[in-house]
Image (tube, helix red, strand yellow):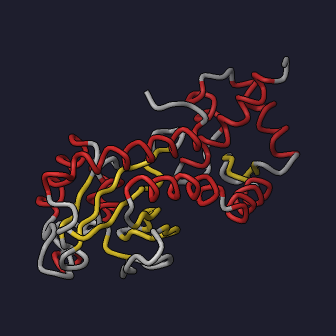
Amino acid sequence: MSQVPAARRALAVLRLLAAAPGPLPASAIARSLGLPRSSTYHLLAAMAEDGFITAIPEERRWGLGVAAFEIGSAYLRHEPLERLARPLLRRLVDRVGEIVQLGVLHGAETLYLLKEQPPGHATLVTDVGVRMPAHLTASGRSMLAHLPAAQVRALFPGRFVDLFVDRTGRGPASLRELRRVLAEDARRGWAVEDGHITEGFASIAACAFDHTAHPTAAITVTFRREAHPPGTWPALAGPVRDTATALTTRLTGRVPG
């Protein structure tokens, strides 16, 4: 256990460098983590010896090393997000009797990773591997609602109106309108789209978060509007939010506060 503080400091360095736009000087690392400068240099040297970070002598900066890349690549091979989410999606299907999906943000689009559905249920255009404009999907908006305003602005520059495509003539058509919708989604705790992707279908989504409270993925239930009229949507959103909370707990190891 005596090595735990050192391990935590090493992990903090990796997280700091991963979040930074580029390599950092040792002084900035020490200042950001509240470490003595001498201890920081010893820590960086040890991490560099094992390949987790690398020194850039000409710039007097430190960046992520090959070993960090290898771990990130292994993470992708293990598909942990899908593995953790799949049983939760199956339980949600049993609970609501509708199609359930897992989506992530990919730039300004929603990328669907998983889909579970009741036997004999009609299929959807939003299948696994399909990408849809994030501002039109409930899953995309449930994640966008928890991003910093500057990041949303970067994804949807207000002056580029043509980025706000639509499929059915519905949905936010400008950055100002999108911001208004996202504020409502954040206040409510779940997002809904009504015929924005396919006429006659609606979706409700809630967001799961990682250990930094960053939106990681969205759980979505999609249904025929006639089967669940708007008055029933808050009740349907309950199980969706419960599932998203359960995924957050699985991702972070703790129940969200």
Residue at the image position 54 percent from the left and 47 percent from the top: 19
Q: Quadrant of residue 103?
A: bottom left
For the question of whether residue 130 can be seen, the reply is yes
Picture quarter with the N terminus = top right
Asked whether, in this view, residue 89 is left or right of residue 68, the answer is: left
Residue at the image position 16 percent from the left and 81 percent from the top: 168
Residue at the image position 35 percent from the left and 61 percent from the top: 221
In the figure, 29 relative to 76: above or below?
above
Asked whether, in this view, residue 54 is left or right of residue 88, the answer is: right
Q: Furthest residue to the front?
A: 120
Picture quarter with the C terminus = top left
> Which is more toward the observer, 58 or 144?
144
| Residue 3: % across, % down | 84, 23
Asked whether, in this view, residue 23 is left or right of residue 110, the answer is: right
| Residue 256: % across, % down | 46, 32
For the question of whether residue 151 can be seen, the reply is no
Asked whether, in this view, residue 174 is left or right of residue 238, the answer is: left
| Residue 67: % across, % down | 80, 55
